[in-house]
């Protein structure tokens, strides 16, 4: 009987290779064969791509929903628009101790509170008095207001407090030029109790003006408003002029014509500015809160010298609004015979909305306008 020879290892491997080759799928003509390993990888990529696209679409739908809802929410709750005008809740920077002006580099400034309103006030004396001012009490600071140095009542804009950095820097500049600077936070701002309103802000400004004027006697007293504070300033000065006791001059830094025009031009309005019904949704909500700040109307009732300061690159209150206000002032019958000037700061200087205090021209501008002698930086 013939013995069967067991197949060699090489033979088995050869047959296995043949079997594997015959079982491997053949790609149709003109197509490259695809290994099984590459099929799931491509599927995973497609799945991941579709997942990201789905999330983007979902986010876009939510953004569109919010975009559509905001105008209706503001229309139904106009008090929201009032908060956006005042922004008194935005206490930037945080954690400031307004009772310590020295922490802001104002070693010749006193913090105090005036009754019955309990509004927080800062009084910065002229820089030449800083050594004498160290450790002095409120009585001493009040007594200095009767000095020959001119005084400025500064009315700040929305957002922040009397301790905002750009405001502090301006106090320092004005103090170095020999001015007393008295500033305060309106009711509802910082450490001043109450709720903000146009009428309340104007009443607070009038209260402060009368307090300073009583201590100034016949010394020069100027009113300086910045941004939203220009609306308070023209309201105040209009009332004073109606009484027959105008201030010695009015200075408006970055002013607007009226609050509706400013709201329409504000960066916050950009997403909605060209939406049908913009005025009805947003601007009428401002008016419903009795907020007008009508500078363009007030200049027709003001009878004192007026200076406007505005940077061409102001992104918050457009330069065009300041120019329109100046043009309205030049046509005002009540301002006829009074000095009305417009100081323009070119875009190349990058002073924008709140850095005009940096200008080396500012001392000379004030000196020439107010007729006082200041050290002029060359």
Image (cartoon, rainbow, N blue to C red):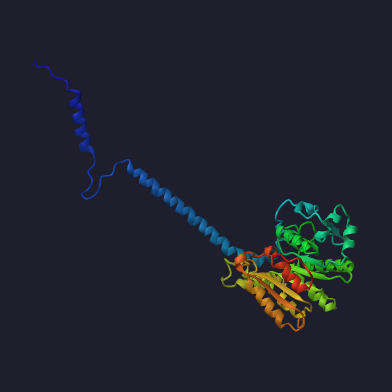
Residue 307: quarter of image: bottom right
| Image point (60%, 71%), residue name | 278
Foreground pick, 71 / 232: 232
Q: How many marks?
A: 0
132 left or right, relative to 313: right
Percent position of residue 24, x then y: 23, 39
| Quarter of the image where the N terminus is located | top left
| Image point (19%, 30%), residue name | 15
Percent position of residue 162, x then y: 76, 59
Residue 354 visible in the shown view: no
30 left or right, relative to 133: left
Classify 42 as above or below 223.
above
Foreground pick, 136 / 237: 136
| Quarter of the image where the C terminus is located | bottom right
Foreground pick, 177 / 111: 177
| Image point (21%, 37%), residue name | 21
Percent position of residue 267, x then y: 61, 65
Residue 335: quarter of image: bottom right
Percent position of residue 127, x then y: 80, 59
Residue 67: quarter of image: bottom right
Foreground pick, 195 / 321: 321
**Residue furthest front in the image:** 378
Residue 300 visible in the shown view: yes
**Residue furthest left in the image:** 1
């Amino acid at each position: 009987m013939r013995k069967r020879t067991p197949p060699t290892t090489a033979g088995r491997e050869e047959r296995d290779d043949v079997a594997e080759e015959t079982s491997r799928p053949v790609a149709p003509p003109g197509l490259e064969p695809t290994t099984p390993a590459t099929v799931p990888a491509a599927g995973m990529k497609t799945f991941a791509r579709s997942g990201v696209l789905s999330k983007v679409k979902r986010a876009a739908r939510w953004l569109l929903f919010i975009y559509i809802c905001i105008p209706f929410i503001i229309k139904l709750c106009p008090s929201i628009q009032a908060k956006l005008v005042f922004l008194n809740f935005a206490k930037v920077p945080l954690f400031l101790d307004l009772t310590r002006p020295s922490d802001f580099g104002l070693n010749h400034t006193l913090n105090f509170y005036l009754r019955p309103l309990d509004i927080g006030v800062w009084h910065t004396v002229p820089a030449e008095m800083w050594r004498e001012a160290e450790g002095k009490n409120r009585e001493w600071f009040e007594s200095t207001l009767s000095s020959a140095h001119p005084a400025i009542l500064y009315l700040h804009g929305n957002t922040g407090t009397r301790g905002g950095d750009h405001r502090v820097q301006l106090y320092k500049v004005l103090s170095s030029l020999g001015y007393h600077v008295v500033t305060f936070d309106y009711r509802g701002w910082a450490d001043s109790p109450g709720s903000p309103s146009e009428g309340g802000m104007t009443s607070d400004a009038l209260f402060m003006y009368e307090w300073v004027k009583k201590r100034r006697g016949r010394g020069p007293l100027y009113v300086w408003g910045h941004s939203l504070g220009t609306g308070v300033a023209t309201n105040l000065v209009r009332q004073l002029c109606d009484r027959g006791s105008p201030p010695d001059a009015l200075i408006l830094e970055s002013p607007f014509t009226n609050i509706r025009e400013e709201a329409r031009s504000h960066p916050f309005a950009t997403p909605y500015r060209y939406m049908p019904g913009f005025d009805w949704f947003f601007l009428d909500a401002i008016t419903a809160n009795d907020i007008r700040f009508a500078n363009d109307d007030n200049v027709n009732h003001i009878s004192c010298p007026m200076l406007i300061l505005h940077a061409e690159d102001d992104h918050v209150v457009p330069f065009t609004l300041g120019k329109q206000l100046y043009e309205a002032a030049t046509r005002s019958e009540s301002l006829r015979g009074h000095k009305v000037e417009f100081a323009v700061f070119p875009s190349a200087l990058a002073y924008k909305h709140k850095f005009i205090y940096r200008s080396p021209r500012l001392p000379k501008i004030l000196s020439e306008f107010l007729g006082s002698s200041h050290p002029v930086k060359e």
